[in-house]
């Protein structure tokens, strides 16, 4: 009986990137859809649970979108970094 050969499908960097994208998409969907369909009762409940519309737009939007430039360019972002 021969040993079964294994293949690495994704590197560790690719796995981390996929998790970041999964979390980013989920957070944006959970916070964005209630804004799009604001008159739906479930939307009002979600926004109220998250602290109100201004809280959602400021904190969640900035937090998730702060990860995007790093994913695309590989450059660090945040306080103390300079934009070229």
Image (spheres, helix red, strand yellow):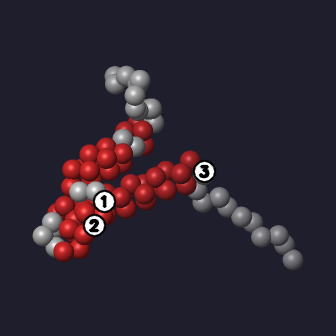
Q: In the image, residue 3 lies at what x, y percent?
A: 82, 70
Of the two numbered discs 1 and 3 on the same chain, state the one appearing first in sequence. Answer: 3
Q: Nearer the viewer, mark 1 or mark 3?
A: 1
Q: In the image, residue 65 lies at what x, y percent?
A: 33, 45
Q: In the image, residue 19 lies at what x, y percent?
A: 49, 56
Residue sticking out furthest to the right = 1
The residue beneath circle 1 is 50
Is residue 72 among the parts visible in the rendering? no
Q: Nearer the viewer, mark 2 or mark 3?
A: 2
- Quarter of the image where the N terminus is located: bottom right
- SS under mark 2: helix
Residue sticking out furthest to the left = 39
- SS under mark 3: helix
Between 53 and 77, the one nearer to me in the picture: 53
Q: Disc 1, disc 2: CB below 8 Å? A: yes
Displayed quadrant of residue 34: bottom left
Displayed quadrant of residue 24: bottom left
The residue beneath circle 3 is 12
Tag shown at residue 46 = 2
Q: Disc 1, disc 3: CB below 8 Å? A: no
Q: Quick one: label 1, few (<14), some, or many (20+) residues within 10 Å?
A: some
- SS under mark 1: loop
Displayed quadrant of residue 81: top left
């Amino acid at each position: 009986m021969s040993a079964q050969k294994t293949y690495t499908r994704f590197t560790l960097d690719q796995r981390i990137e996929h998790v970041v994208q999964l979390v980013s998409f989920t957070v944006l969907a959970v916070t964005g859809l209630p804004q799009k369909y604001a008159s739906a009762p479930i939307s009002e409940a979600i926004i109220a649970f998250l602290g109100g519309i201004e809280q959602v737009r400021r904190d969640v939007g900035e937090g998730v979108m702060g990860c995007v430039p790093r994913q695309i360019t590989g450059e660090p972002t945040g306080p103390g970094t300079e934009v070229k």
